[in-house]
Amino acid sequence: MLEIDHIYKTFNPGTINEKTALNGTTLSLQEGDFVTVIGGNGAGKSTMLNAIAGVWRVDQGKILIDGVDVTKMKEHKRARFLGRVFQDPMMGTTATMGIDENLALAARRGMHRGLGSGITKKERENYKELLKELELGLEDRLTSKVGLLSGGQRQALTLLMATLQKPKVLLLDEHTAALDPKTAAKVLALSDKIVSEHNLTTLMVTHNMRDAIAHGNRLIMMNEGQVILDISGEEKKHLTVENLLDKFEQVSGEEFANDKALLS
């Protein structure tokens, strides 16, 4: 479903600020794979997600989604293949619009926009049923402005919007990092539920090693723009943070240096 073939990305080439963010990154996801991504600061995690999303073009290599080469495709055109939830709960919704209006925008993504009537009664009923599954009481607040919601409510809504039209690939970019632990756990549980129910191919970047181990069927670790560990199956089920740190040191020849990840 997703094929990343030796992609490279260097920022500010030829200057004193030159930084190689992706250095031949290669990764393949089968349909339904839920892959968690862990790595230190500057490992290339978010750069890889941005490359997939088309935020910037890669210097070399190819990116294919469900067999379609999207390497040179513009960001807004490849958006029809993707769903994305960002770290900042403010980024996935429009604060001045109602919950129902935000959902309607997500439902109409990629469709022709005409001058017809707005949200139908049937659509509102459908949105209510979807919101009930979040168990946040939002089904009774359909017309409330999204800007009035808490960060956790907003992130849950963003997750629902990102998966309303089943995307080929779902990108979760540290989507619980800005939430308190209790709310983060709820959003992660909701992520598991939605991914499982819709069999979504998913990449979840996280700074939390325990979350990376506990969620998904595969775990990859990045370092200096490359995938250096790819763990799945029984090995992942029995993985601990200590095991993961040991494996990192064995492969990279250095200690894992990211206080945020270690303290989570």
Image: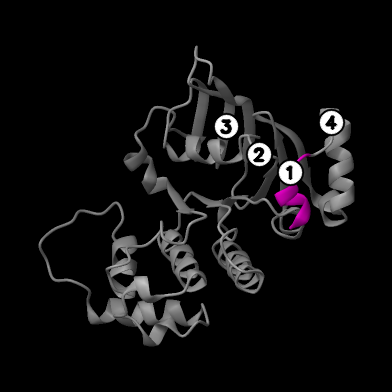
- What residue do we see at 49% from left, 69% from top? 151
Q: Nearer the viewer, residue 124 or 173?
A: 173
The answer to whether one can see residue 64 in this image is yes
Does dot 2 land on a helix, a strand or a loop? loop
Return the mark for residue 123. none
**Within the image, what quadrant is residue 22 found in?**
top right
- In the displayed structure, 186 sits above or below 72; it is below
3D distance between C-alphas at marks 4 and 1? 12 Å
| Left or right of residue 120: residue 186 | right
Q: From which residue to which does the magenta span run?
A: 257-264
Q: What color scheme is it?
A: one colour
- Please give left or right for residue 30 compared with residue 96 in the image: right
Q: Which residue is mark 4?
A: 254
Q: Please, what is the three-letter code of the amino acid marked with disc 4?
A: Glu
Identify residue for label 2: 41
Q: What is the secondary structure assignment of the residue under circle 4? A: loop
Name the front one of labels 4 and 3: 4
Q: In the rendered structure, which amino acid carries the disc numbered 3? A: Ile
Q: Position of residue 222 (x, y in %)?
A: 70, 36
Please determine whether, in this image, residue 99 is positioned above or below residue 132.
above
Look at discs 2 and 3 and give the one toward the viewer.
2
Cα–Cα span, label 4 and label 3: 26 Å
> First in sequence: mark 3 or mark 1?
3
Contact flag, marks 4 and 3 (Cβ < 8 Å): no
In the picture of the structure, the residue carrying the numbered disc 1 is 258
